[in-house]
Amino acid sequence: MKNIKGILCDLDGVLYNDSILIDGVIDSINNLKNKGYKFLFVTNTSGVTSDELFDRLTNMGIPVQDNEILSPPLAAFNYVKNKGYKSAEVLGGNSIKKLFYDHIEENTTSPEVIVIGDIGKNWDYQLMNDLFNKILNGSHIVGLHKGKFWKASDGLRIDIGAFITGLEYATTKQSVCIGKPEKAFYEAAINKIGLPPENLLMIGDDIVGDIQGAKSANLTAVQVKTGKYRQELTENSPVPPDYLIQDFNELIQLLDH
Ligand SMILES: [Mg+2]
């Protein structure tokens, strides 16, 4: 892989599981950076802003610069602003709400757009039914991403893509989703790191968000067997990874070949 100059790197499931670092990844990132590889950390993490994510990664000891992160909240905000929506209801952490409500009127009765981010265990029937009725009455749906599930330290957890898809099904309306595997998100990543697709690889644990998404943007795709990797999902994927490795630490050997 002599032509690779930049690495788009997923976070959760690749560098850590539910904030517990995978052994060796800090040394591996430092080694790759010392060899001259450019990094951009691309994540669907949507409960916090990229500034907060930067602080979180730094506190974990991960060598990251503040311009090396791309996550959906800001991209979603730009989308909503460009669409000209005047009022919004935002499901997410306080910093995500502030990002939107500083510029767009908060309206939890009949918002023009409902922005759906990560709210952990706060999903329940009442919330789904409330959103269902607002969408039927005309609210648009913007999802920060459409992930199916993620891996916490105690096992797999259902992700917001399942709730968004449920709302689409019940209302017969379509959402616009922002994060991986959306091609627009990968194009934003390619622009931000400043290298052409043939010089980039994407490494991640999610066969859809990371692998299929990267391939749709013509990137080399490397899947790790950590995090949410499932052998049967990869074997049955219409778009397989270019390379399948045990964990992030094996990336150096792969790049040296
Ligand atoms: Mg991941």
Image: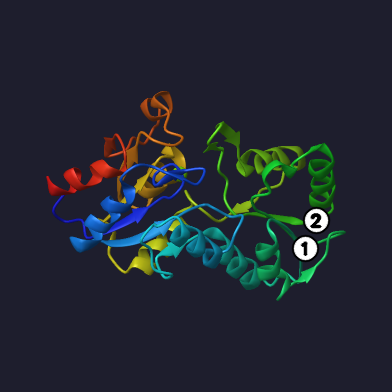
Residue 199 in view here: no
Q: Left or right of 96: which side holds 241?
A: left
Q: CA distance from mark 1 to mark 2?
A: 7 Å
Residue 185 in view here: yes
Quadrant of residue 190 within the rendered picture = bottom left
User: Which residue is outermost to the top?
Assistant: 232
Say whether disc 1 or disc 2 marks the residue closer to the N-terminus. 1
Q: Pointer 1 and pointer 2: residues touching (CB < 8 Å)?
A: yes
Q: Determine the quadrant in which ligand 1 lies.
A: top left
Q: Nearer the viewer, residue 88 or 49?
A: 49
Which residue is depicted at the point 52% across and 54% down? 179
Q: Nearer the viewer, residue 28 or 100?
A: 28
Q: Left or right of 171: which side holds 180?
A: left
Q: Percent from the top left, x then y, of residue 245?
A: 28, 36
Q: Percent from the top left, x then y, of residue 53?
A: 52, 60
Q: Is residue 244 above or below residue 106?
A: above
The amino acid type of the residue labelled 2 equals Gly
Q: Percent from the top left, x then y, of residue 242?
A: 27, 39
Q: Nearer the viewer, residue 153 or 3?
A: 153
Q: Left or right of 4: which side holds 13?
A: right
Q: Is mark 2 within 8 Å of ligand 1?
A: no
The image's colour scheme reads: rainbow
Q: Percent from the top left, x then y, of residue 60?
A: 45, 55
SS label for mark 1: loop
* Residue that badge 1 annotates: 112
* Residue that badge 2 annotates: 138
Which residue is depicted at the point 62% across and 72% down? 82
SS label for mark 2: loop
Please rate how many residues cluster around mark 2, counting C-alpha atoms within 10 Å: few if below 14, some from 14 to 19, many from 20: few
Please rate how many residues cluster around mark 1, counting C-alpha atoms within 10 Å: few if below 14, some from 14 to 19, many from 20: many
Q: Quadrant of the C terminus?
A: top left
